[in-house]
């Protein structure tokens, strides 16, 4: 199992009230895996951002994206989390 620490900052950035988030992912050794600054998205969209950033690692572990006829898709990272192969520990700060 691979464990990742995900630091999230959720903030309202502009006068229109749009919500943005920053995501920083490090492994258990403290090595920076991925980082994104000022991604648009509401509520818990940072979870989708995290999955997108970790997809290459999940794919290396043998997980492939699943697509369904109704347009829904499951990211490799979500499948790896559901299988217990990836553990995500979130630290969410809301400004």
Image (tube, rainbow, N blue to C red):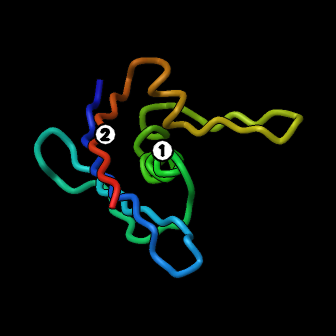
Q: Which x, y percent locates residue 13?
A: 45, 75
Q: Is residue 13 left or right of residue 6?
A: right
Nearer the observer, 45 or 63: 45
Residue that appears at 47% across and 51% down: 46
Nearer the observer, 8 or 63: 8
Image quadrant where residue 4 sits: top left
Q: Which x, y percent locates residue 81?
A: 44, 26
Q: Is residue 8 left or right of residue 50?
A: left
Residue indicated by mark 1: 47
Label total for image:
2
Q: Which x, y percent locates residue 60?
A: 43, 40
Per the rendering, the mark at residue 57 is: none
Per the rendering, the mark at residue 90 is: 2
How many angstroms separate mark 1 from mark 2 (CA)? 9 Å
Q: Residue furthest right?
A: 69
- Quadrant showing the N terminus: top left
Residue that appears at 30% across and 57% down: 24
């Amino acid at each position: 199992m691979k464990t990742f620490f995900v630091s999230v900052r959720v903030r309202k950035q502009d006068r229109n009230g749009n919500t943005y988030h920053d995501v920083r992912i490090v492994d258990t050794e403290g090595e920076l895996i991925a980082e994104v600054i000022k991604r648009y998205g509401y509520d818990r969209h940072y979870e989708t951002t995290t999955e997108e950033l970790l997809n290459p690692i999940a794919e290396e572990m043998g997980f492939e994206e699943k697509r369904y006829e109704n347009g829904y898709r499951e990211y490799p990272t979500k499948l790896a989390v559901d299988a217990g192969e990836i553990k995500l520990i979130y630290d969410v700060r809301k400004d």
